[in-house]
Amino acid sequence: MITFRGVTKSFAGSASPAVENLSMDIDRGAVTVFVGPSGCGKTTSLRMINRMVEPTSGTITVDGADVSGVKAPQLRRSMGYVMQSAGLMPHRTVLDNVATVPRLNGQSRTSARARAAELLDVVGLASAMGGRYPAQLSGGQQQRVGVARALAADPPVLLMDEPFSAVDPVVRAELQQELLRLQRDLAKTIVFVTHDIDEATILGDKVAVFGAGGRLAQYAAPEEILRAPVDDFVAGFVGRDRGFRHLSFQAGNGVPLHPVQLLTPSELANPAVAVEEDWALAVDDGGRPLGWVPASRRASFTAADQLVPGGSLYREGETLRQALDAALSSPAGLGVAVDPENRVTGTIRAAEVLELIEQARLQRSAG
């Protein structure tokens, strides 16, 4: 879909090129992530695709056509582009921000705004948001609008330059999952820039690790980069805990579930209800977890806001990394497993997850 062949970019006054002799193929309908430290050329490489930056030498093609043969404004309107700050026009409503590119492509105001309204729903925003201005939105909402605007002309290629780095970690995780959901539905060719190796391995079908001097150090599936970094630079960038990250690619379907005492709001408010083991789990009337109740402090627990906060949740079928994180982050030493509606289905134990991890390791070694 997108190819780089011997692409170099040098800036005047710089002792070394920003990108040096880059050759790679980006697959159609996949998410390709450019990752690396600051100044390694990943953003420059992204911006050369839509000619926001012109290469010094080499060729870049999209669907077999050399991008240098397409007028830059036309090329940019044919691709979606999402940046770190969302880049919304402050004097225009959300709806008119999203409608910008269809209007530039010749659509009527009515049809462009109708398309914009559809896309607000696609990116998970209520239709009422359409009449607001960017300053009235949270950072996460602004980024969703930015994604909607990038999708407005239904481009085959979506370029994303660190789009989630300016939001808090909770919102960032939500936006990452939202992007994966959109990609399952839309199958765009996405090129995504980040400096975060965790984000790269979560999102990428393939990951390109850039090193100092604008060189491509390794280009492979995220699992391969975590399992077998090609050199010391990649190993150092991925980090010493790459074995833990690699667990993200091991399914946790076989994690055993164990029962736990559940306390409903009425039982929680009744001091006569005893905690049978060291810990009980408080749930709402729908069976969703609220927090832990230790046996030693049961008498003082008469309201939900007095509960001991739980750790992360494990949804059945998620990875061994998520299962282990749920178990290790829990104050009770028991990870909470939930169904798709977040209702408690049982608890998991770290020792049993570690046993599954060891079994998976031995199977890989034998293979």
Image (spheres, rainbow, N blue to C red):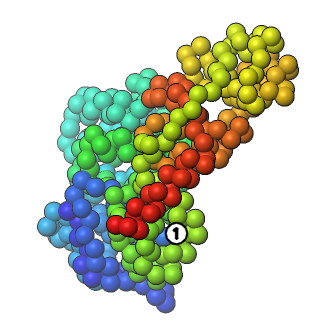
Q: Depth check: give the residue in front, 365 or 196.
A: 365
Residue at the far left: name it: 64
Tell me where residue 34 appears, x and y as whole percent.
40, 66
Q: Nearer the viewer, residue 242 or 102?
A: 242
95 relative to 224, above or below:
above
Residue plotted at (56% across, 53% down):
354
The image quadrant where one finds the C terminus is bottom left
Amino acid type, callout 1? Val
**Residue 48, horizontal then vertical, whole percent:** 32, 69
- Single out the residue that lies furthest toward the bottom: 15
Which residue position holds label 1? Answer: 238
Residue for point 21% across, 34% down: 108
Q: Is residue 161 visible?
A: no
Above or below 47: residue 318 = above
- Residue 250 vertical placement versus 15 (above, below): above
Residue 328, can we see it? yes
Q: Relative to residue 31, is residue 115 depicted above or below?
A: above
- Left or right position of 93 against 337: left
Q: Name which residue lies at 37% across and 83% down.
A: 20
Q: Secondary structure beneath disc 1?
A: helix
Q: Is residue 105 left or right of residue 131?
A: left
The part of the image, by quadrant, that contains residue 24 is bottom left
Return the x and y of residue 181 as percentages of the image width and height. Answer: 36, 40
Which quadrant is home to the N terminus?
bottom left
In x, y percent, where is residue 89?
45, 44
User: What residue appears at the point 42 percent right and 42 percent down from the top-left corner?
Assistant: 253
